[in-house]
Amino acid sequence: MEQIELILLVGAIVAITAKRLRIPYTVGLVVAGILIDFVPIRFDINFSKPLIFGILLPPLIFEDAIYISWRWLRHDLPVILAFAILGVLLSALATAVLMYYLAGWTWEAAVIFGVLIAATDPVSVIATFREADVHGRLKLLVESESLFNDATAAVGFSIALAFAFGEQIYFPTAFLQVVLSIVGGVVCGLLIGFGVLFLAGRTDEDLVELSLTTIAAFGSFWLAEYFSCSGVLATLTAGLLLGNTLSWNYFSKKGTELSIGFWKFSAFAVNSIIFVTIGVNIGKRDFAQFIVPILVAIGAAIVGRAAAVYPVSALFFRSSLKVESRYQHVLVWGGLRGALGLALALGIPEEFSYRRQIILATFAVVAFSVFAQGLTMRPLLRKLKLVTEKSEKVKR
C-alpha cells in the first residue's frame, strides 16, 4: 500500500513538472520510475498477466469507452476491425520474418515475439493521444484499434506458444477462436452493461450508482476472461453502452458527475502505476548483452506496424471510409507498445530458451515507444497539422 501511495505522489509531482516542461506526462513517469531504481527504496511491483489484465486494464478501458460516441464508432467499425485483425496478423508476420533473418532467432522465437509485439497497447496509446489533444476521427481510429486488437493478440499469442512447443496448429480452429473471443467479449459486456442499467434505473443513490459502474468495468472483464473471451472488448462494450445512455436518465445527475470524476482519477492512478513500474523494470534490465537483436527488434516493430497500416488502409482507398495519408503516418508512428506486450512476454514459460531475449527485446521496444515515439508525437501531429484540427471532433 505504501508503494501505491508513493506512486501517486510521484504521479502528482510528474504531472505538475511535465506540464511546465512541456513534455509528455507518460515520459516523465517512466523517467521517474528509472530514477526510483537508484534510491534506497525497495520497489516490488512487477508486471504479470493477472495484474495487468485483472486490475489495471479495466478502469483505463472503461474510462475511455464512456466517452466514445457509438455513432462515430459504428461508421468506422469496418476499418477498425480490419486494423485489429488483419493488421495484427500482417504486423506479426513482417516482424517475425525480420527477426528470423536479421536477428538470427529461430522461427519459434520470432513468431512469438512478432505476435506479442504486433498489437498496440491501449494504456500507452490512450495516454499519449489524450496528452497530445488529438480529436476527431484520428483519435477514434487510433484508440479504438488499440482496444479491439487485444482479442487477436491474445489468441495469436496462445497459438504462437503452441507452435513453439511443437503442437499441431489448425487454422480453421484458430480463426474460430478469434471469432469466439470477439463475440464472447461483446456478449459479456452487453450482459453486464444491461444488468447495470436495469439496477441503476431503480435507485437514485449516487454511491450505489458509482458501485454499479465499478461492477460494469471489472465484472464484464472478469466474466469474459472466465470464459476465455476478450476481457478488453467486454469492458469496452459495457463502457460504450453506459456512456451512450447517460442522457437516458438511468443514472441521477449527481451519480453521473460522481462516476465520471471517479473514473478520471482511476485512469490517472492506473497510468501512474503502469508507467512508473515500466520505468523501474527498464532500469533493472541489462540490454548490452543482446544489443544486436534488440536493435533489430525495434526496427522490426516499426516496419511491422507499417506493413499493417498501409496495406489495410489501401483496402478502403476508393470508399467513403478512406483513411487520409497523414492519418496513416500517425497510425504507424503512434502504434505504441507498453504493458500489454510486457505482460505477454513475461508469460512465456521458463523452459523456452529464447525467453530472456524476447523479454529484453520487448522492454527495449516499449522504451523506444515511450521515449522516441512519445516525445516526437506532438511535433509530428503539428507538422501534419492535426493537433488543432476541429472538424469531425468527437463530443467528449
Image (tube, grey):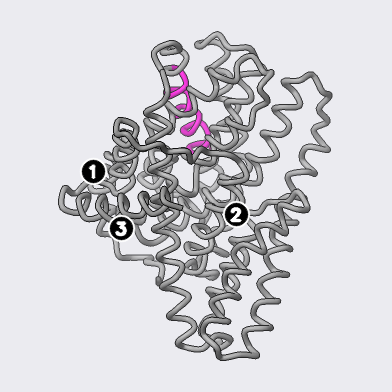
Q: Give residue 289's position: percent from left, percent from top.
A: 43, 10
Residue under pointer 3: 133
Disc 1 residue crowd, few under 14, some 14–19, many 20+, Cα 10 Å: few
Q: Nearer the viewer, residue 27 or 143?
A: 27
Three-letter amino acid code of the residue under disc 1: Pro
Rendered-image quadrant of the C terminus = bottom left
Q: Earlier in the sequence, mark 2 or mark 3?
A: 2
Q: Quadrant of residue 193?
A: bottom right
Looking at the rendering, the stretch of residues picked out in magenta corresponds to: 296-311
Q: CA distance from mark 1 to mark 2?
A: 29 Å
Left or right position of 44 against 24: right
Three-letter amino acid code of the residue under disc 2: Pro
Disc 3 residue crowd, few under 14, some 14–19, many 20+, Cα 10 Å: some
Residue under pointer 2: 78
Q: Nearer the viewer, residue 129 or 221?
A: 221
Left or right position of 29 against 365: left
Q: Give residue 69's position: percent from left, percent from top.
A: 50, 69
Q: Is the stretch drawn in magenta largely helix, strand or loop?
A: helix
Three-letter amino acid code of the residue under disc 3: Asp
Q: Image point 75% across, 53% down: which residue?
A: 226
Q: CA distance from mark 1 to mark 3?
A: 12 Å
> Please, is residue 19 above or below residue 264 in the view?
above
Magenta span has 307? yes
Left or right position of 160 against 324: right
Residue under pointer 1: 379
Q: Image point 74% across, 56% down: which residue?
A: 183
Q: Quadrant of residue 276?
A: top left
Q: Secondary structure at mark 2?
A: helix
